[in-house]
Image (cartoon, rainbow, N blue to C red):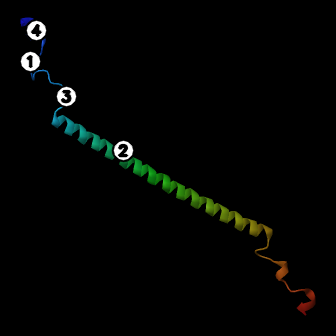
């Protein structure tokens, strides 16, 4: 019987697990990490939206300039022969 008592651990001496304080510290650290991750994610998302808007504005400006260039090169913006009076009605 003496050998059996030596092999069995005494009650309360071999408790494994986490204490409440260890769990609270782990939860607090995890909260800080998650908060930092979410704030970084939100700032990246704002940056992507801002760049998308800027790209869209650049595209619209480029298309407007192309349209102006096309009208100027065709000459219809500055001189429209259809709007001129005919030579017979000018006098």
Q: Please tell me which of labels 1 and 2 falls first in the chain.
A: 1
Q: Which residue is mark 2?
A: 37
Q: Which residue is mark 3?
A: 17
Out of 73 and 17, give the one closest to the viewer.
17
* Helix, strand or loop under label 1: loop
- The quadrant of the picture occupied by the C terminus is bottom right
Gap in angstroms between the C-alphas marked 1 and 2? 45 Å
Residue 19 drawn at (x, y percent): 16, 33
Crowding near pointer 2: few (<14 within 10 Å), some, many (20+)? few
Can you tell which of label 1 and label 4 is closer to the viewer? Answer: 4
Q: Residue at x 62, y 62 (%)?
A: 60
- Left or right: where does residue 30 sit relative to residue 74? left
Residue 25 drawn at (x, y percent): 21, 38
Q: Which residue is mark 4?
A: 4
- Left or right: where does residue 86 sit relative to residue 47? right
- Left or right: where does residue 66 sit relative to residue 43? right
Residue 6 drawn at (x, y percent): 9, 10
Q: Please tell me which of labels 1 and 3 falls first in the chain.
A: 1
Q: Is residue 57 above or below residue 32?
A: below
Which quarter of the figure has residue 77? Answer: bottom right
Can you tell which of label 3 and label 2 is closer to the viewer? Answer: 3
Gap in angstroms between the C-alphas marked 4 and 2? 53 Å
Can you tell which of label 4 and label 2 is closer to the viewer? Answer: 4
Out of 13 and 39, give the one closest to the viewer.
13
Residue 11 drawn at (x, y percent): 9, 21
Q: Please tell me which of labels 4 and 3 falls first in the chain.
A: 4
Gap in angstroms between the C-alphas marked 1 and 4? 11 Å
Gap in angstroms between the C-alphas marked 3 and 2? 29 Å
Q: Please tell me which of labels 4 and 2 falls first in the chain.
A: 4
């Amino acid at each position: 019987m003496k050998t059996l008592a030596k092999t069995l651990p005494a009650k309360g001496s071999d408790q494994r697990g986490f204490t409440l304080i260890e769990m609270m510290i782990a939860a607090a650290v995890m909260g800080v990490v998650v908060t930092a991750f979410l704030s970084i994610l939100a700032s990246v998302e704002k940056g992507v939206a801002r760049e998308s808007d800027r790209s869209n504005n650049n595209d619209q400006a480029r298309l407007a300039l192309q349209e102006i260039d096309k009208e100027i090169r065709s000459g219809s913006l500055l001189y429209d022969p259809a709007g001129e009076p005919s030579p017979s009605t000018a006098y």
